[in-house]
Image (cartoon, rainbow, N blue to C red):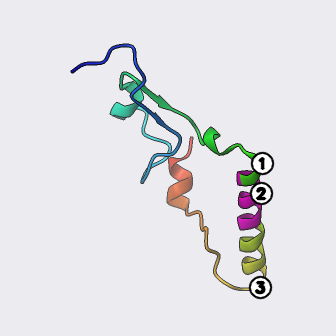
Amino acid sequence: MVLRGRLRCALDVTDPQEPLPVRHPLRRAEGAILTPHVGAISRSVRHEIATEIFSDLNRFFSGQPVENRVTVDMLDRMT
């Protein structure tokens, strides 16, 4: 069965690679919508994000390993 003109999926996060490469098939998939993390815009999610950031900053400045580490490889993939 082929559905035409209908939304089949909406993705806010792609794993393991985000953002997806420019030529990735999902970017051209009919009926697919990709968004850059805008699904997490609620007040409660922003509060959780801030809590994680401050926890990692406290760990970093206390000489402990952070839990949400960003690597150079990750930065290279960001657009």
Q: Quadrant of residue 56?
A: bottom right
Q: Is residue 19 magenta?
A: no
Is 20 placed left or right of 57 in the picture? left
Q: Which residues are magenta?
A: 45-53
Circle 1 crowding by C-alpha within 10 Å: few under 14, some 14–19, many from 20:
few
Q: What amino acid type is highlighted by mark number 3?
A: Ser
Q: Amino acid at mark 1?
A: Arg
Cβ atoms under marks 1 and 3 closer than 8 Å: no
Q: List x then y, in percent, for residue 75.
A: 57, 53
Whether tag 1 and tag 2 are in contact, CB under 8 A, the answer is yes
Which of the labelled discs sits on residue 61, or is there none? none
Residue at the extreme left of the image, as rendered: 1
Q: Residue at x 43, y 51 (%)?
A: 15
**Residue shown at 68%/85% (left/top)?**
64
**Mark 1 or mark 3: which is in front?**
1
Is 18 left, or right, of 51 in this rendering?
left
Q: Position of residue 14 (x, y in %)?
A: 46, 46
Residue 64 or residue 11, whichever sits in front: 11
Label drawn at residue 43: 1
Label 1 sits on a secondary structure element that is helix
What is the C-alpha distance between the residues marked 1 and 2? 6 Å
Q: Which residue is mark 3?
A: 62
Q: CA distance from mark 3 to mark 2?
A: 22 Å
